[in-house]
């Protein structure tokens, strides 16, 4: 049971153990399935919780029970929301309704149209991809749109929106 374990292996095992139904599992239970030490698994799980990819369901005494947090997006195969759009257009990934809902009650200036809000979201995703800081309101909007994790790194969806923005800026350039 002295096998080295990676975070990815723990995440995959956690996903398999908890994705079906409302299940949670302890680090010791996961260690039995992976066949390594509970301390190594617990260390990986704490890191995954900080990244927002796993969460603690409950603490029973000194024992924590973990579950997998879905991005609601298959990490291996992203599919656009709408089939009519090119995958290099962010409209395929973020709907107009989502933007209207998230930007209601905000005042970012500009013309206040959905197109302007989409431009703000695209620019914020590009900034986040490079490690820059964005304002609190746009950061909250990115979190609600599930474009960033709680630690402000891009999700797979956020990476795709960032790619769309870069594609648009690079193809429109002179």
Image: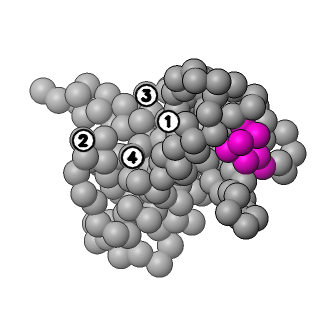
**In the image, residue 114 lies at what x, y percent?**
45, 57
- Residue at the outermost right position: 21
Q: Earlier in the sequence, mark 4 or mark 3?
A: 3
Q: Residue at x 41, y 54 (%)?
A: 151
Judge the density around disc 3: few (<14), some (14-19), many (≥20) Cα neighbours within 10 Å.
Answer: some
Q: Residue at x 22, y 51 (%)?
A: 132
Q: In the image, which is nearer the foreground, mark 4 or mark 3?
A: 4
The answer to whether the residues at label 4 and label 2 have Cβ atoms under 8 Å apart is: no
Element type at mark 3: loop
Residue beneath disc 1: 156
Please state the extent of the stretch shown in magenta in the rendering. Answer: 24-30
Judge the density around disc 2: few (<14), some (14-19), many (≥20) Cα neighbours within 10 Å.
Answer: few
Q: CA distance from mark 4 to mark 2?
A: 10 Å
Q: Earlier in the sequence, mark 3 or mark 1?
A: 3
Instruction: Place residue 165 in its image quadrant.
Output: top left
Q: Earlier in the sequence, mark 2 or mark 3?
A: 3
Instruction: Place residue 93 in its image quadrant.
Output: top right
Quarter holding the C terminus? Answer: top left
**In the image, residue 11 lies at what x, y percent?**
61, 34
Residue beneath disc 3: 88
Can you tell which mark lies on residue 130? 2
């Amino acid at each position: 049971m002295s096998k080295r374990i990676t975070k990815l292996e723990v995440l995959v095992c956690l996903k398999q153990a908890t994705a079906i139904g409302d299940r949670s599992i302890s680090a010791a239970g996961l260690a039995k399935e992976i066949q390594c030490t509970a301390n190594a698994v617990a260390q990986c799980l704490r890191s995954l919780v900080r990244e927002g990819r796993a969460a603690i369901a409950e603490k029973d005494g000194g024992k924590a029970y973990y579950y997998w947090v879905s991005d609601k997006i298959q990490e291996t195969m992203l599919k656009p929301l709408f089939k009519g759009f090119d995958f290099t257009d962010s409209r395929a990934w973020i709907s107009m309704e989502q933007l209207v809902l998230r930007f209601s009650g905000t005042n970012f200036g500009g013309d206040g149209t959905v197109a302007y809000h989409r431009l703000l979201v695209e620019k914020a995703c590009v900034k986040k991809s490079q490690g820059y800081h964005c304002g609190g309101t746009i950061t909250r909007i990115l979190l609600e749109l599930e474009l960033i994790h709680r630690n402000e790194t891009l999700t797979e969806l956020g990476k795709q929106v960032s790619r769309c923005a870069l594609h648009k800026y690079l193809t429109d350039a002179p």
